Image (cartoon, rainbow, N blue to C red):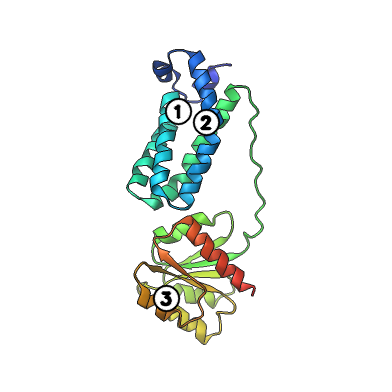
Amino acid sequence: MDVNILKNNGVNIDKALELFGDMETYNETLQTFLQEIDEKLSNIAKYKEIADMANYAILVHSLKSDAKYFGFDRLAEMSYQHELESKANHIYFVYENYDSLMQEARRIVALVKQYFGQEVIIPATSVNQVKDKKILVVDDSDVISGFIKRVFNDSYDVVVAKDGAMAINYLTGSENFCAMLLDLNMPNVNGFVVLQYMKNNDLFSKVPVSIITGVGDDAIISQAFMFPIKDVLRKPFNERDVKMVVEKTIAEEGE
């Protein structure tokens, strides 16, 4: 094993040896880390998907500690930031920065495998079968629309409209949408204007709609169900919620 493989790729071996004392102990403990890391990353992904920030914070704290002990300084810093933000329940920060954290974690795993002379398998790029399908997201919040775009980045082409007027403009154009997520409470032209336009122009059979609304808006939701909407996505929502609603909406498109 050539320790320069680690040193030349940013691993702070000198700092790590202050804890482990010698390379033999370091290597033995690093082997244990390698055996456990896949399960840890899998659980981090699971808790992130369901927006369980309490358990997410516990696991990224553990990842931070491991990274700090072994001299993976950048991974330790990134994990620590995720720990702070998840403890504060800043869900959208976690989603926005999750891919960068996982990319660094996977880089470290590949580096450690290389150090131990193990085969590094690069996952094959999956062929996207539905990327040509479009979802129209109508919401004036860049945070909400950006979050939904990230969730479906590898699955659908997400088109964003900032208000009802833009949504109607898209609906009158030549683009075809397999689903629409429509916020009801927007400035200028709100979601109900869009729903009425779709009813007047018989568009519900062409573009299935689920609404986005805040928790506690029961009266507004009842009003919305006067139109043939498919489902309701309540803010704040997580990755699993939005995937379930979109899958249901698109599935009912073909019925």
Instruction: Give the x, y percent position of residue 109.
Output: 55, 31
- Between residue 119 and residue 222, name the one nearer to us: 222
Above or below residue 219? Residue 16 is above
Q: Amino acid at mark 3?
A: Gly
Answer with left or right where residue 55 lies relative to residue 198.
Answer: left
Above or below residue 158? Residue 37 is above
- The residue where tag 2 is placed is 108
- The residue where tag 3 is placed is 191
Q: Disc 2 or 3, which lies upstream in sequence?
A: 2
Instruction: Give the x, y percent position of residue 197.
Output: 48, 83
The residue at 62%/59% (across/down) is 131
Q: Disc 1 or 2, which lies upstream in sequence?
A: 1
Q: Amino acid at mark 2?
A: Ile
Asked whether the viewer can see residue 189, the reply is no
Instruction: Give the x, y percent position of residue 44.
Output: 48, 43
Question: What kind of element bears circle 2?
Answer: helix
Q: Amino acid at mark 1?
A: Phe
Answer with left or right where residue 58 lies relative to residue 2.
Answer: left
Instruction: Give the x, y percent position of residue 54.
Output: 38, 46
Q: Disc 3 or 1, which lies upstream in sequence?
A: 1
Question: What kind of element bears circle 3?
Answer: helix
* Residue 117 image-quadrant placement: top right
Image disc number at residue 72: 1
The residue at 42%/44% (across/down) is 56
